[in-house]
Amino acid sequence: MNLELRLKEIKARIEEIRGLVDSETDVEKLSAYDKEVDELTNERKAIEKKLAMRGKFEVKDVIETKSTEETAEMEARGQALKEGRTVTVTADGVLLPEHVDDKISPYPFREVSTLVEQVHTVNLKGGETYKKSFVKSHGTGGLTAEGDPYTTAEPEFGYLTISKVKVTAYAEITEELEKLPAADYQGEVLKGVNIALRKKISEQILRGAGTTNTFKGIFSANCEALADATDLELSAIDENTLDEIVYAYGGDEEVEGGCVLILNKNDLRAFAGLRTAEGRKVYNVDYKAKTIDGIPFIISSHCKAISAASTQAGEYGIAYGPLANYEVPIFSGVEVAKSTDYKFKDGIICYKASVFTGGNVIGYKGFLRVKKAAAQSESDSDEEEGE
């Protein structure tokens, strides 16, 4: 056998296998190639040893540096496959290159109650705190004899104040997030500060204390239009709750329409969960139309749940009335400013957003407020039964 010829054949086959490996993606085939290279390498070494012993040439002349490095790489790859490890052959081979999606997955749940979108807003850009009047009642005409004075029937007015409130939000991002990524982090931050403003306004519509730089919320003791209103107290959500709320609101001449129920999600669950003795639902809760027996509802986390044991007696949990009875004046548009000066050395970009607005109940007794009733003691229950 011609050893020199066989050595050339072995070299040629190893080169051929290297060319195949560069485009191969099948792990099993790669393993077979590495096994073949191992066998050819062992045979080559044996031939080179024999030729060296014959004095034809020295082994070091045959094993070049490049060949040694490539052989070591092939052997390492083969060993990795035997151990079950994942090996990247080429950038578009077995493993895909890293990919960055240019879309940011949004927060999947609503963060702002629809209440903020449905109250009555007025554009007063450039304005300031202002006073507003409302009608408390109209007089009643009388039967007047000849020559007697006419019956006085003047309307009674009330007055309220809507103060300017500054609502703000602030956020920071690194300059890398703005300039380098494919995803629009800057756009998401700008969206976030707007959501933050709306969340605070939504909270203030219900819970604003009516003090300096706050709304006069529906549950505030400082609402002038609700000063004469009588709150409804409930200890639980039961089969009579909706009727009690509907009939407690408004005047003596009409069951008022166009009203909305503002409540906690857990109280909505309590309405939906009520069953008759026969197992039928007491209330028809339509989640698509957002109604309870035809009465529209709005969920707000700023309402305490009447149905929750943790809600303390006297805490407000439900409001009922037309949303047009709550007014939110817009004294300025939303202003968003960007700055790189504050943390220039740190490479931080700052965003701040602000809006001047306010809010107050503008309709006399415009909302019925429902609060958690105190727990009834056993002695009280016994007295009622005795009566």
Image (cartoon, grey):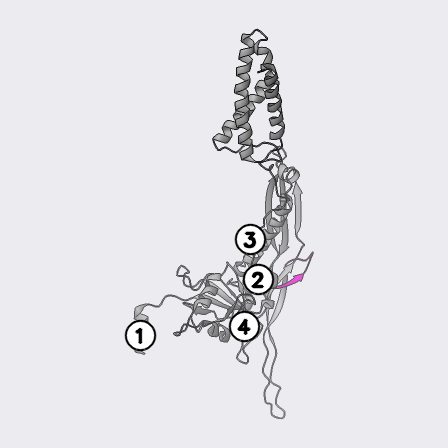
Callout 1 crowding tier (Cα within 10 Å): few <14, some 14–19, many ≥20: few
Q: Is residue 184 left or right of residue 320?
A: right
- Report the front residue among 188 and 324: 188
**Which one is earlier in the sequence, the residue at label 2 or at label 4?**
2
- Report the front residue among 53 and 303: 53
**Residue extent of the magenta highlight:** 120-129
Q: Where is residue 259 in the image (x, y as percent from the top left)?
A: 56, 71
Q: Where is mark 3, residue-wise?
A: 108
Amino acid on which disc 1 is placed: Glu
**Contact, CB < 8 Å: mark 4 with mark 1?**
no
Q: Distance between the residues labelled 2 and 3?
A: 19 Å
Q: Where is mark 2, residue-wise?
A: 115
**Which one is earlier in the sequence, the residue at label 2 or at label 1?**
2
Q: Is mark 4 on a helix, strand or loop?
A: loop
Q: Residue at 56% of width from left, 58% of height from top?
A: 202
**Which one is earlier in the sequence, the residue at label 3 or at label 4?**
3
Q: What element carries label 3?
A: loop
For residue 383, the mark is: 1
53 is higher (above) or lower (below) than 272: above
Q: Where is residue 98 in the image (x, y as percent from the top left)?
A: 60, 37
Q: Where is mark 4, residue-wise?
A: 294
Q: Which of marks 3 and 1 is in front?
A: 3
Please tell me whether the stretch drawn in magenta is mainly helix, strand or loop.
loop
Q: Where is residue 42 in the image (x, y as percent from the top left)?
A: 52, 19
**Which one is earlier in the sequence, the residue at label 4 or at label 1?**
4
Residue most toward the top?
55
Quarter where residue 367 is shown: bottom right
Q: Is residue 202 magenta?
A: no
Callout 2 crowding tier (Cα within 10 Å): few <14, some 14–19, many ≥20: some
Amino acid on which disc 3 is placed: Pro
- Report the front residue among 306 and 134: 306
Q: What element carries label 2?
A: helix
